Amino acid sequence: MKALSDFLAIILFFVIYTTTHNIIWATIGATVVGIFQAAYTWIKFKKLSFFQWVSLIIVVVFGGLTIWLDNPVYVMLKTTVVCWLTALAVGVGQMMGKNGVKLLMGNELKLPENVWTKLSYAWMIFFILMGLINLAIAYPFTAEQVDVWAKYKMYGYIPLSLIFSIGQAFYIARFLPKPTGE
C-alpha cells in the first residue's frame, strides 16, 4: 500500500497530463497531492521524516517554479534532483558510519551489517542511474520532449522502481530468520 501511496502523485500527474496534454495542470495536481500526502502524514503521525520533509520541499519548489514560470523544465528536473539527493544522503550517511537504508527500514528488519551495507550501495547506484535516465529522457527539455518524458514517468520510472524494490525484497528474504514450527 505504501508503494501505491508513493506513486500516487506520479499516477495523478500522468492521468491529468494524458487527458489535458497540459503539463502545468498535471504539475498542479501532483503538487497538491504531494502537499496533501505530507499533511495527512503529519496529522496521523505528528511528524515527517527527514526524507519526507526534503521531498515536500522539492515538490513545492520545483512544482511551484514550473507553475509560476510556465516552464516544464523544473518538473522534469525534479525527478533527477530527488534521485541524486537520495543517493547523496545514503552515500554521505555511509561515509559517516550511518547506514541510511538501515535507518529507514531497520525497525522492521533485522539484517547483518554487511547486508545493510550492500543495500546502501545498491540504493546509491540505483538512484544515480535513475537520475541519469531521467535526464536522458527529458533532454533537451523542450515542449516536444514533455510527452516522451511523461510517458517515461509512468511506463519507465514506476516499473523500474518496482523491479528494484522486488529485487531488493528477494535479496533481503535470503537473510531473514526462518520461521520455526510449533
Image: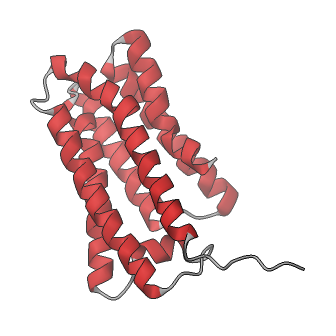
Q: Nearer the viewer, residue 144 or 170?
A: 170
Does residue 11 sit above or below 93 in this rendering?
above
Q: Quadrant of the C terminus?
A: bottom right
Q: Nearer the viewer, residue 15 or 130?
A: 130
* Quarter of image, res 23: top left
What residue is drawn where x is 38% and y is 84%?
A: 98
Does residue 7 sit above or below 94 in this rendering?
above
Q: Nearer the viewer, residue 174 or 153?
A: 174
- Which residue of the protein is positioned furthest toward the top in this rendering? 20
What residue is drawn where x is 43% and y is 62%?
A: 51
Residue 111: percent from the left, percent from the top?
54, 81
Number of marks drawn:
0
Is any part of residue 87 visible from this angle? yes
Q: Nearer the viewer, residue 4 or 142?
A: 4
Residue 1: percent from the left, percent from the top?
64, 47
Q: Is residue 24 left or right of residue 19?
A: left
Q: Is residue 156 left or right of residue 76?
A: right
* Quarter of image, res 95: bottom left
Residue 175: percent from the left, percent from the top?
55, 77
- Which residue of the protein is positioned furthest toward the left in this rendering? 140
What residue is drawn where x is 42% and y is 27%?
A: 13
Residue 37: percent from the left, percent from the top?
56, 45
